[in-house]
Image (tube, rainbow, N blue to C red):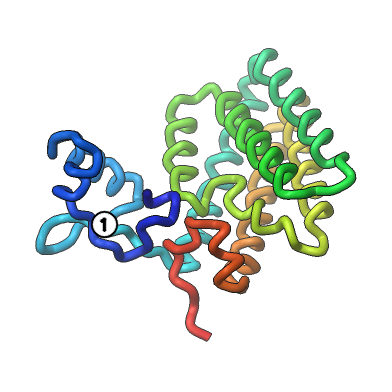
Amino acid sequence: MILAGELPGGARIAELALVDLLGVSRTPIRAALVRLEQEGLLESLRNGGFAVRTFSENDASDAIELRGTVEGMAARLAAERGAPAAVLAGASACLARIDDVLARPALDDDAFLAYVTLNREFHQLLSEMSGSAVVQREIERVVNLPFASPSAFVVLQANAPRARDMLVVAQDQHRQVLEAITRREGSRAEALMREHSRIARRNLGEVMRQRAEDLARMPAARLIRKRSP
């Protein structure tokens, strides 16, 4: 409900209403709410209960940078320790499928959704390449914030004049990261991955300047508090 934009930032969460809606006891509901608080999507209230957390643009930017830092570490570890051949092959095949999407004559909504799915898969494979359960857990934690995931703002770029160019640049960075990992160039892989995340940080500013009807296409934007003019 939060990620779908049904509950905007600041909305109070009523446990009993969720019990009635979902038809379960209060114990699993309470456990789920505590988990969402730990993941950063809810905040506890002084008088008890929870509310959907509201994030500033700086919060969103910091979360994206944090993802880039941890993913950069994952890329470095993959290069230094040696990524499993099967995972490398899977990542290469994933990039080939992204190439097929970008080769389409028109990048319509279906093409962007296909890119989102494949982009998510590539980043997941990158996490697995690290061979570190700790790093994978931290990446999973930060990408659970809807605006910090690798594809958070991609769909909103569909109508941008340079939409294809932006995706081509991102795909080129994917290939450079995978190449650095394959060549066991840890520092280069880390630097490239951190630079890759900066695309999302730049996109954040552009997204928050869009019209309300455009932002409605990204429900997670309802959690971000826009800067005052």
Q: Could you say where residue 50 lies in the image, as x and y percent from the top left?
A: 21, 56
* In the image: residue 92, left or right of residue 42: right
Q: Look at 26% across and 57% down and name the residue there.
A: 43
Furthest residue in direction left, as rendered: 47
Q: Is residue 163 above or below residue 211?
A: above
Furthest residue in direction bottom, as rendered: 229
* In the image: residue 157, left or right of residue 204: right
Q: Is residue 86 above or below residue 119?
A: above
Q: Is residue 76 visible?
A: no
Q: Nearer the viewer, residue 73 or 55?
A: 55
Number of numbered labels in the structure image? 1
Q: Look at 65% across and 20% down and name the residue there.
A: 83
Q: Look at 70% across and 25% down and name the residue there.
A: 91
For badge 1, the amino acid type reads Glu
Q: Is residue 180 above or below residue 52?
A: above
Q: Secondary structure at mark 1?
A: strand
Toward which corner of the image does residue 183 lie, by quadrant?
A: top right
Q: Is residue 125 visible?
A: yes
Q: Look at 43% across and 32% down and name the residue there.
A: 137
Q: Nearer the viewer, residue 217 or 220?
A: 217
Q: Nearer the viewer, residue 222 or 77?
A: 222
Q: Could you say where residue 194 lies in the image, as x and y percent from the top left?
A: 64, 48
Q: Is residue 105 above or below residue 54?
A: above
Task: Identify the residue under disc 1.
Answer: 43
Local packing at callout 1 (Cα closer than 10 Å; few below 14, some 14-19, many 20+) is many
* In the image: residue 106, left or right of residue 110: right
